[in-house]
Amino acid sequence: MTDLLFVYGALRKGASDDWRMKGARWMGSAEVPGTLVKIDWYPGLVLKGDTRVKGEVYQIGPELLKQLDGFEGIGLTDEGKGEYHRIQADVLLGQKPTKVWIYEWLKGIDGYELIHSGDWLESDF
């Protein structure tokens, strides 16, 4: 069984942690409406707002999904202490709405710098 995962920051091709996507199948560029913020050396996506957040969709297996969940802090005993949760949402893959998993930032946008372009790889951070 495989899942589709939308990545928008450090896991994208050319970003600092793209090596973690080894074994995943790139399905294409995609975008989702939301708000992208700079957390530190990585971004967070809140699925509210009207910025077109750019990313990529990958087809991944259950073992890689489990590894990425660990990297993103999913599955903590106290999820309130985590930064992200993994939820399903629709993205535009090409021009086609596609249901994918997304790691959504849990801490909101207040106090964080907005990435108005919606593209982490084109930001100056």
Image (spheres, rainbow, N blue to C red):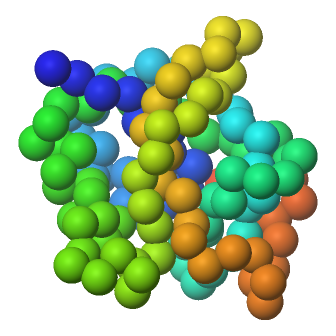
Residue 40 position (above or below residue 5): below
The answer to whether residue 115 is visible is yes
- Residue at image location 63% in from the left, 28% down from the top: 91
Find residue 114 and report its horizontal and vertical position in percent: 83, 71
Residue 8 position (above or below residue 94): below
Find residue 82 and report its horizontal and vertical position in percent: 39, 79
- Residue at image location 15% in from the left, 20% down from the top: 1
Q: In the depicted view, which residue is nearer to us: 81 or 19?
A: 81
Where's the C terminus, which quadrant? bottom right
* Left or right of 45 on screen, residue 99: left
Q: In the depicted view, which residue is nearer to us: 93 or 86?
A: 86
* Left or right of 89 on screen, residue 36: right
Q: In the depicted view, which residue is nearer to us: 76 or 8?
A: 76
- Residue at image location 21% in from the left, 78% down from the top: 77
The answer to whether residue 13 is visible is no
Find residue 105 and report its horizontal and vertical position in percent: 57, 67
Residue 118 position (above or below residue 85): above
Residue 85 position (above or below residue 47): below
Find residue 26 and report its horizontal and vertical position in percent: 40, 25
- Residue at image location 81% in from the left, 65% down from the top: 115
* Left or right of 93 on screen, residue 99: left
Q: Residue furthest left?
A: 63
